[in-house]
Image: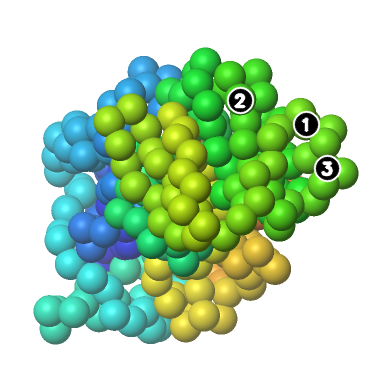
């Protein structure tokens, strides 16, 4: 019986494993090999790792975790979680089973992009969704925003000090009053396709017009990448995040959540960043240890 099973080998799961390893708790980290930021060539806005490739970050983290004998890392996918606090059973796709007293869900989310031809193929670098993570890379150049209404207006305000010009596409779907206050240009018309070019991205409209940008920003419709929140009946927010307390405890005893799926108190939605994932991963692991201490002391 393991003390803790961690589902997910991204930043949240890796940090949880490191924390538990340092506390000498028997831990199994189950990594499916699917990562939200796999399409991104470099992470940003992460101190000491600004510009590091996500794959390199994971490799370094795994080497660090290997130094702790109480942590076992597996490659595989969990298909179901059953049991009660102190005695959870996790079934894996290969037919094996893992038992653990507690479970940390660090399974992440998946993005659904607007149905624009070519967009999915270049999402991750020249097309992004977070100006905190990718805005600076377009500094002093022209940037486009795919979106509408208040969301486009908020992005335009954020990007105004960074870009030489901010353009909202398609402008006829945007909120005119909100955009007018940002100083952003609105270009109307349906978008036929987008494509990466040598110095950025080209947007082609249905009427044949084309515009070039250093990069594009778009909102994504994200969803949880794994079904366990529903399977376990966990409380979720309207945004789709798993509701947790300040230490990552979910509404189900013995189940914790960290990373992009976790929505801490006071937030309208999960904060999707590597820095936040690391933070919540550490907190969830610490809560596992603290709850063990509480149970032992009675």
Q: Image point 21% across, 39% down: which residue?
A: 55
Q: Image point 28% across, 48% down: which residue?
A: 38
Q: Is residue 215 above or below residue 235?
A: above
Q: Image point 23% across, 71% down: which residue?
A: 77
How packed mark 2 is, by other alpha carbons closer than 10 Å (few <14, some 14-19, many 20 or more), is: some
Q: Residue pushed farthest right?
A: 177
Mark 3 to mark 1: distance in Å? 7 Å
Name the residue tied to disc 3.
Answer: 178
- Please indicate, yes or no, whether residue 24 appears anywhere in the rendered image: yes
User: Would you say the residues marked 3 and 1 are in contact, meaning their CB atoms lie under 8 Å apart?
Assistant: yes
The location of residue 203, given as percent across then percent down, is 45, 46
Type of colouring: rainbow
Mark 2 to mark 3: distance in Å? 17 Å
- Please indicate, yes or no, whether residue 11 appears anywhere in the rendered image: no
- Residue 182: which numbered mark, if any? 1
User: Would you say the residues marked 2 and 3 are in contact, meaning their CB atoms lie under 8 Å apart?
Assistant: no
Name the residue tied to disc 2.
Answer: 165
Secondary structure of residue under mark 1: helix
Q: Is residue 163 above or below residue 207?
A: above
Viewer-nearest residue: 207 or 89? 207
């Amino acid at each position: 019986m393991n003390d803790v099973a961690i589902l997910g080998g991204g930043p949240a799961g890796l940090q949880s494993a490191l924390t538990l390893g340092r506390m000498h708790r028997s831990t199994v980290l189950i990594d499916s090999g699917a990562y939200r930021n796999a399409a991104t060539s470099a992470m940003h806005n992460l101190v000491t790792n600004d510009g590091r490739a996500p794959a390199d970050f994971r490799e370094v983290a795994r080497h660090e975790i290997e130094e702790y004998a109480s942590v076992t890392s597996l490659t595989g996918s969990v298909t179901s979680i059953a049991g009660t606090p102190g005695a959870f059973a996790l079934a894996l796709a290969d037919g094996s089973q893992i038992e653990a007293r507690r479970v940390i869900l660090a399974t992440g989310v998946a993005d659904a992009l607007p149905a624009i031809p070519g967009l999915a193929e270049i999402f991750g670098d020249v097309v992004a969704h977070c100006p905190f993570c990718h805005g600076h890379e377009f500094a002093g150049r022209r940037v486009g925003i795919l979106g509408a209404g208040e969301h486009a207006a908020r992005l335009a305000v954020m990007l105004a000090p960074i870009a030489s010009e901010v353009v909202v596409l398609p402008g006829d779907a945007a909120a005119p009053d909100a955009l007018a206050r940002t100083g952003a240009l609105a270009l109307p018309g349906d978008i036929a396709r987008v494509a990466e070019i040598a110095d950025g991205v080209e947007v082609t409209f249905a009427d044949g017009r084309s515009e070039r940008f250093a990069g594009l920003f778009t909102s994504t419709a994200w969803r949880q990448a794994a079904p366990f929140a529903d399977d376990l009946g966990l409380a979720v927010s309207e945004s789709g995040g798993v509701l947790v307390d300040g230490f990552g405890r979910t509404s189900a005893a013995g189940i914790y959540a960290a990373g992009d799926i976790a929505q801490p108190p006071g937030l309208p939605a999960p904060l999707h960043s590597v820095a936040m994932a690391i933070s919540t991963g550490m907190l969830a692991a610490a809560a596992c240890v603290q709850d063990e201490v509480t149970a032992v002391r009675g």
